[in-house]
Amino acid sequence: MPPDRSYSFAERLERLGVVAIGTVFAYLAFVGLLSITRGTPLQTVIAEGDRSGPPPPTDSLFARTMEMFTGTHVDGGNRVQSVNNGSVYDSLWKDLRSAKQTITVQMYYSLPGKVADTLAAILKARAHAKVRVLLLLDAFGSQNLKRAWAQSLRRAGVEVALLRKLRWYSVHNAADRSHVRVVVVDGRIGYTGGFGLADYWLGDGLHEDQWRESNVRFEGPAVMQLQAAFASAWVEATGELITGDIFFPARGFQPIADGMGAGLLFTAPTTGSTPAERFLALSIASAHKTLFITNSYFVPDDDFRRLLKREVKRGVDVRVLTVSSKTDVKTTWYAGRHWYEDLLAGGVRIYEYQPTMIHSKTISVDGLWSSVGSMNFDNRSLAFNNESNLVVLDRRFGAAMDSTFFNDLRYAKEITLDEFRKRSPWERLLEVVAVALSRLL
């Protein structure tokens, strides 16, 4: 007799349950994949009416337009200075040691070494002097720091918190990172840029083991915006919303005589259009003469490449300085290079910095509108990360930014279309593979 293949009702129900559970998990995995590979929706910038584009930086409506679309408020009366490469620490250590009431520090990338140990020693000393010291570290970016390092700070009275801890039930935190750099001293002095707690940020940016970096030190009302950005992250990590005049002193809102217009672009991930992409698109489209971009991770999507090429057609001098083969993330470098031909053919001039890894993230528009901070020109920064950039509307600072840009070009190699087309089939293959992963980088 053939075997009995009939199933009881209970067995059939069990099998249906297994299929249903498998289907649910497959669906959730698909949704998760879409989430971690999402892009941003902005495709172009259009202007209706008499203008051919958004107001240029010389127009009084420019700052208002930027604020409406990005939330970035440009306040007058700020003193801003570049503190590039290892000089940022010389200045920072001095300011931290002078703190009388509060220190707030938020960092993304941290490694054991001289920089981390020096910071720890200063923070402990100020905590011992009854200064309120808050240190916030991104859990993903600081995972290489030893637990004992943070414990010694806590024992000394420093309040240390981890942002977006990595747990089995919160693996999405590995994608949604806080890439922000914040230091505020007494609610009076602010720092932001691309620097972190690692020894390769020491030095002059001209030797292979010393990264080229761009940062700013500033005083004035923009510092209060930076402090507010820290407060929003601190409450996420600890549940505590810090307020009061020791963190937000009245004098911090007072403009400095003969100061500069400046504000903070603070952007957070969302499922729709982000302030980061709107800021970048408006900055590009507002250029009338020059657009100089320095970015370590330059992987523009189709839409941003069209925006850059459109500016060239409008007569704008568009130049991009990015990293060479000395990059710390080869996959991102190859992904960016995949689009060089398209950009070069469209008239965009591209340079690769030769001495070492260049980690700067700056923009200068018409020598008047500038940005220095943590935001990269890639999908991760535009769609996933929290980022912080100081924006400055000032001809003096813009001229200094342009001068720095051209000085960096002295150590860069310009990529020409004819030469680039001669690269090997192996390099082309690596670019194709890398660009397929670019949404995840």
Image (tube, helix red, strand yellow):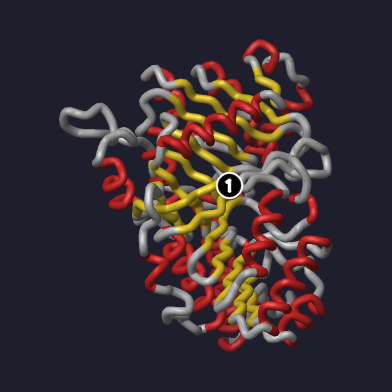
Vertically, is 212 above or below 402? below
Q: Residue furthest top?
A: 418
- The answer to whether residue 60 is seen in the rendering is yes
Drawn side of residue 216 relative to residue 64, left or right: right
Which image quadrant: the N terminus? bottom right
| In-front residue for pair 325/362 | 362
Task: Name the secondary structure under disc 1.
Answer: helix
Residue at x 63% of width, y 29% of height:
338
Residue at x 43% of width, y 20% of height:
312
| In-front residue for pair 432/114 | 114
Pinpoint residue 67: horizontal percent, then vertical percent.
32, 51
Vertically, is 335 above or below 239? above
Vertically, is 29 above or below 239? above
Pinpoint residue 371: horizontal percent, then vertical percent.
48, 44
Q: Amino acid at mark 1?
A: Arg
Pinpoint residue 385: horizontal percent, then vertical percent.
54, 57
Q: Label 1 belongs to which residue?
A: 439
| Residue neighbourhood size for the residue with mark 1, other residues' Cα within 10 Å, grouped as few (<14), some (14–19), many (≥20) | some
| In-front residue for pair 36/13 | 36
Q: Residue furthest front?
A: 257
Drawn side of residue 313 relative to residue 64, left or right: right
Drawn side of residue 418 relative to residue 292, left or right: right
- The answer to whether residue 274 is seen in the rendering is no
Count the marks: how many?
1
Residue at x 60% of width, y 49% of height:
215
Residue at x 69% of width, y 35% of height:
323
Pinpoint residue 142: horizontal percent, then vertical percent.
71, 66
